[in-house]
């Protein structure tokens, strides 16, 4: 079933909205492209967050080719964008399902008509669990896969299913974690014990496979060794589950966020049993100018299976130069409320002289050294010609915590003409 976007794009854009043309206020996002506004020539209320359509399309093609070559599925993590319009593009590309981390995510997905949700978290909230059980009862075609990492968690799910009078089992995967970090059993022995417990809770629970998230480690050689150790446990548990399935049965085996995608895919390709192997990268669609760009350039993190071409950064934040209080200091109207700062500070990538059309690049001599709520502090050579009133573009490091700062993002073509308004559901 195609992703439904109309419920999210039909509501008029309200006044007081940052990052959209004033002329867009009061009209539906789906109607904006007809006006053919250009980012720099229209009455956009800066700062603005833009998505480059050509980069997104290139990244889609790169991932499609990679999945075909690696014989893998993709359940992209929707929390990155929480934008049903972008989900629809991923669905067009053959997404196996969509990954969620909260019940609120799942509610948005269901409103968008998504029929398979991979819940990459522990589901113990009774209100959220009741919503999921109701959806499963109401829609026989809806598939929901949840994680468990404890006997207590498995029992909570089974008891809720019993109390609800469920006529179909809750599908679960055992989660494998990394010591000292977040959810997931720590050893193969613990996981196999949990497999037995889940089996004893049938028919209320049904074991479907094993899962891990490797993105809790550093993106360096030491982090890669930790990831490989984690994946080795996944392999052992998957082999144990596979041996216990009926003839022709296939476990679901899932890992692979956005930083170690190639390494994880390469490990899975070497395993000697058939499974539905599912990656869950969400950031590939836009990539970034920081964390993921650096990880992709780091050959130590790349496996034997590789993308045929580099992913491209698709996100840019544009804001005005507000002040040049010192020769080597520029203050730009983009702050913590506009762009991610949880991993790295943003990166200056370009600038535009007011009332002109030529975007000029910025090199490493321009650096963001601090952020306030609405201001970026940037050091720049004293000889640089940028002036108050000009526009500067910043690239982010970590798309997830940039998207969540925007209700509306502007999709632009290579001439920065607005071709769509992307609506988020955070």
Image (cartoon, rainbow, N blue to C red):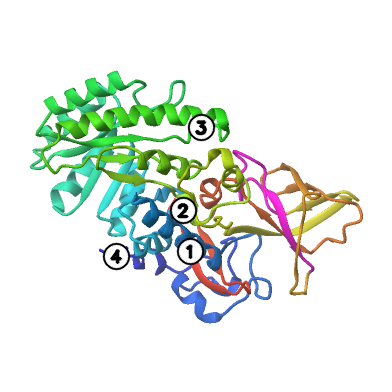
Q: Is residue 93 above or below residue 194?
A: below
Is residue 245 rendered to the left or right of residue 277?
left
Q: How far apart are marks 4 and 2 (CA)?
A: 18 Å
**In this figure, which residue is indicated by the disc labeled 1?**
422
Q: Nearer the viewer, mark 3 or mark 4?
A: 3
Q: Is residue 262 above or below residue 407?
A: above
Going from the N terminus, do you reach mark 2 or mark 1 first?
Answer: 2
**In this figure, which residue is indicated by the disc labeled 2?**
81
Going from the N terminus, do you reach mark 3 or mark 1 first?
Answer: 3
Q: Does the magenta stretch include residue 251?
A: no
Contact, mark 2 vs mark 1 (Cβ under 8 Å): yes
Q: Distance between the residues labelled 3 and 4?
A: 37 Å
Report the predominant secondary structure element of the magenta stretch.
Answer: loop
Q: Which mark is residue 224?
A: 3
Going from the N terminus, do you reach mark 3 or mark 4 first?
Answer: 4
Which quadrant of the figure contains the N terminus? bottom left
Picture residue at 64% right of the left edge, 65% below the top: 45
Q: Distance between the residues labelled 3 and 1?
A: 35 Å
Q: Residue 2 carries which label?
A: 4
Q: Does the magenta stretch include residue 347?
A: yes
């Amino acid at each position: 079933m195609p992703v439904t976007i109309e419920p999210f794009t039909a509501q008029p854009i309200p006044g007081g909205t940052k990052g959209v043309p004033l002329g867009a206020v009061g009209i539906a996002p789906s109607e904006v492209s007809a006006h053919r506004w250009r980012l720099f020539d229209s009455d956009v209320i800066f700062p603005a967050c833009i998505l480059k359509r050509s980069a997104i399309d290139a990244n889609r093609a790169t991932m499609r080719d990679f999945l075909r070559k690696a014989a893998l599925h993709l359940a992209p993590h929707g929390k990155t964008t929480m934008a049903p319009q972008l989900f629809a593009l991923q669905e067009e590309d053959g997404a196996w399902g969509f990954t969620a981390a909260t019940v609120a995510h799942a509610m948005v997905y269901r409103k968008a008509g998504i029929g398979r949700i991979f819940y990459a978290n522990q589901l113990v909230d009774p209100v959220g669990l009741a919503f999921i059980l109701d959806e499963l009862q109401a829609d026989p075609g809806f598939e929901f896969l949840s994680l468990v990492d404890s006997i207590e968690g498995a029992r909570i799910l089974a008891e809720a299913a019993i109390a609800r009078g469920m006529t179909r089992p809750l599908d679960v995967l055992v989660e494998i974690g990394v010591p000292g970090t977040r959810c997931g059993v720590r050893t193969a022995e613990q996981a196999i014990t949990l497999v037995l417990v889940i089996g004893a809770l049938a028919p209320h629970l049904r074991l479907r496979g094993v899962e891990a998230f490797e993105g809790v480690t550093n993106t360096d050689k030491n982090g890669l060794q930790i990831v490989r150790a984690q994946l080795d446990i996944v392999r052992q548990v998957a082999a144990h589950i596979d041996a216990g399935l009926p003839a022709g049965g296939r476990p679901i085996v899932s890992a692979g966020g956005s930083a170690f995608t190639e390494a994880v895919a390469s490990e899975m390709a070497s395993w000697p049993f058939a499974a539905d192997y599912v990656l869950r990268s969400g950031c590939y669609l836009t990539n970034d100018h920081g964390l993921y760009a650096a990880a992709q350039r780091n050959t130590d993190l790349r496996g034997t299976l590789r993308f045929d071409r580099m992913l491209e950064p698709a996100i840019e934040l544009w804001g005005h130069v507000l002040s040049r209080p010192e020769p080597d200091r520029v203050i730009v109207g983009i702050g913590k409320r506009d762009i991610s700062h949880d991993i790295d500070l943003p990166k200056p990538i370009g600038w535009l002289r007011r009332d002109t059309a030529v975007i000029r690049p910025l090199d490493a001599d321009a650096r963001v050294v601090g952020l306030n709520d609405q201001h970026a502090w940037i050091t720049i050579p004293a000889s640089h010609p940028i002036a108050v009133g000009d526009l500067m573009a910043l690239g982010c490091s970590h798309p997830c915590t940039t998207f969540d700062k925007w209700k509306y993002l502007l999709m632009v073509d290579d001439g920065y003409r607005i071709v769509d308004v992307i609506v988020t559901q955070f």
